[in-house]
Image (tube, rainbow, N blue to C red):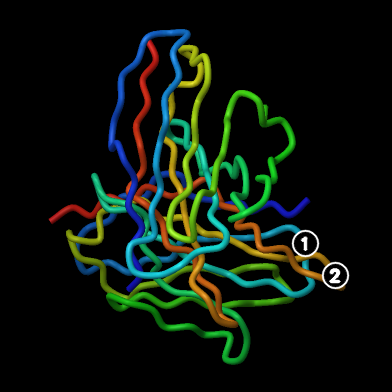
Amino acid sequence: GAVVSQHPSRVICKSGTSVKIECRSLDFQATTMFWYRQFPKQSLMLMATSNEGSKATYEQGVEKDKFLINHASLTLSTLTVTSAHPEDSSFYICSAPSTGLKETQYFGPGTRLLVL
Amino acid sequence: AQSVSQHNHHVILSEAASLELGCNYSYGGTVNLFWYVQYPGQHLQLLLKYFSGDPLVKGIKGFEAEFIKSKFSFNLRKPSVQWSDTAEYFCAVKGGVYGGATNKLIFGTGTLLAVQP
């Protein structure tokens, strides 16, 4: 099946710094990618839809100036957590849909962010 | 807005027991339904999906799910679980708005399954 990678797999940063997370589709092109956030013992919450060549679409309640998304190419989307705070500590997961009528999401392995 | 509920947060079974995990969604219309599995330390993997046709869907590793439109349900089943099935299982729904569908996946809260050898 299709493969989606994320880098880094885990990151620890100081409060106030910015962290960039990359999401790559390794063997297929994705004009759209999705960014999710997963809190411990909770479900995945969609944060935003990343669109290649245009602005990302953010879900209600997600600060677009805090979570910057750039979809630079058909295989790469980045999420930058700006001025991170401890409450931003979470598991961030990206996904990319396969093409075709029976679209299926392929998920990356996730990035564990810890803000001290 | 569409929402997905999974009734069981934790399930503990012995090997060879039968499994059924409940999943219900809130809005009807045209929906696509999915079950994903997350093994310890691994990323989400697709178990099975329903788009149309036969409401009984068979997936990988002996799992199946039945779409019951009248009950807004898509329960996951496996007749005989194995220790290697220990994982977290997520139900997800796409669409569900009458007259149109979105491409957003809405996830349930997940069910943690522990299979005792």
Which residue is denoted by mark 2 in the rendering?
B98
B60, A68: nearer the viewer: A68
Left or right of residue A71: residue B84: left
Q: Which dot marks residue A42?
A: none
Left or right of residue B104: residue A89: left
Quarter of the image with the C terminus of chain A in it? top left
Image coordinates of residue A67 in percent, x first then y, are: 58, 30
> Amino acid under label 2?
Tyr
> Looking at the image, which residue is at 47% across and 55% down?
A95
Residue B98, quarter of the rendered image: bottom right
Image coordinates of residue A48 in percent, x first then y, are: 62, 44
Left or right of residue B81: residue A53: right
Which residue lies most toward the right here? B99
A51, B21: nearer the viewer: A51
> Amino acid under label 1?
Tyr
* Label 1 vs 2, first from the N-terminus: 1
- Which one is closest to the eye, mark 1 or mark 2? 2
Determine crowd level at label 1: few under 14, some 14-19, many 20+ residues with C-alpha closer than 10 A. Answer: some
Determine crowd level at label 2: few under 14, some 14-19, many 20+ residues with C-alpha closer than 10 A. Answer: few
| Tags 1 and 2 touching, CB below 8 Å | yes
> Looking at the image, which residue is at 47% across and 8% down?
A16
Residue B45, quarter of the rendered image: bottom left
Which residue is denoted by mark 1 in the rendering?
B27
**Residues flagged by tags 1 and 2 on a common chain:** yes
Helix, strand or loop for disc 2: loop
Height in image: A43 above or below B7?
above
Spatial separation of the CA atoms under disc 1 and disc 2: 8 Å
A65, B111: nearer the viewer: A65
